[in-house]
Image (tube, rainbow, N blue to C red):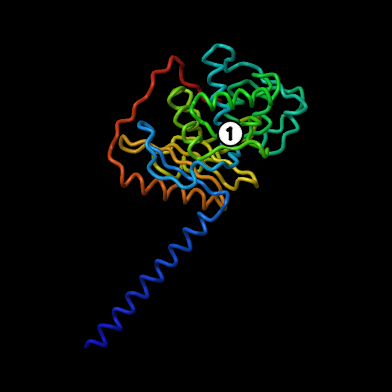
Amino acid sequence: IFSHMLNKLFKILTYVSLFWFATVCFNNSVYANSKYASIIMEEHSGKILYSRSANEKRYPASMTKVMTLYIIFDEIRKGKLNYKSKIVFSKRAAGQPPSKLGIKRGQSINLKEAMYALVTKSANDVATAVAEKIAGTEINFAKRMTNTAKKLGMRNTRFMNASGLHNKYQKSTAKDMAILAIAIRRDFPTEYKIFNTKSFKWNGRKYNNHNNLLKSYYGTDGVNPGYIDASGFNFMAGVERKGIRLIGVVFGGKSGNSRDKHMINLLNRQFKKIKSIPVKMSPSPQTPLSRPR
């Protein structure tokens, strides 16, 4: 009997050890990635619920466009731009690499179309054209982006362009990107709704939003994924459930699918832990954006 109990205990310990080993190996494969960083933050309090390398500098990729849109919203609120403002494409803007709308030099779209193209298609040519419209040159626009970031408390962020295309000096952190995700909804709650756009039709083509969680993860209302070789697959997400609003940021996913699953796993774990906190919204004088037909 004693021998039988020992054998049974040995088997149990073996199974536990194998499970522990597999878990450690999986976690190490994620966190050993030098591109990886993540954070989950509760929006109302700003409390950090989970973080890994959240203050380490990484390449933000197309999450950069969230700051571009923050400045666009600011220009609209100040009356310097409106939804019908013409965005003309320079040679430089038209020459940006994909993802893009493919608008030729000298052609134009209006600002509302540009905003939807940034949110859904993550169009790099549109980002450059808007930057030139607002600041004359993209580098001047990037300086404004960086200055705005500092004012928001994003102390470890430097922008070099409006799109997120690779530049070795353009870096941010998971924490700073979470701060931006909170700020854009807090400061522009009505305009923020554009991030919930699932598709955009332009020039006879339909562009689906790259944010797959909008249709697959209940409560998601934004904000933006991104990818360049130097960053891996990034994601900034805003999710609200039963009065709890969480912001998640992930850098350095191995693929879009694995990044999405990892984000969902991180959010699920925190939603189970956190108690209900009332979601507060700031009033906005703006009227909601009407979606293009």
Q: Residue 218, position in %: x, y?
A: 39, 42
- Would you place residue 284 above or below residue 258 in this image? above
Secondary structure type for disc 1: helix
Q: Quadrant of residue 129?
A: top right
Q: Which part of the image, by quadrant, shows the N terminus? A: bottom left
Q: How many marks?
A: 1
Identify the residue at horizontal 44%, vertical 14% (top origin): 285
Q: Amino acid at mark 1?
A: Thr
From where the camera sits, is residue 289 visible? yes
Q: Residue 63, position in %: x, y?
A: 56, 36
Question: For this rendering, which residue is in front, 279 or 193?
Answer: 279
- Would you place residue 257 above or below residue 66 in this image? below
Question: For this rendering, which residue is in front, 102 or 138?
Answer: 138
| Left or right: 83 as drawn, with respect to 284 | right
Q: Residue 261, position in %: x, y?
A: 47, 51
- Residue underneath mark 1: 64
Q: Which part of the image, by quadrant, shows the C terminus? A: top right
Identify the residue at horizontal 43%, vertical 25% (top origin): 186
From where the camera sits, is residue 293 visible? no
Identify the residue at horizontal 42%, vertical 17% (top origin): 284
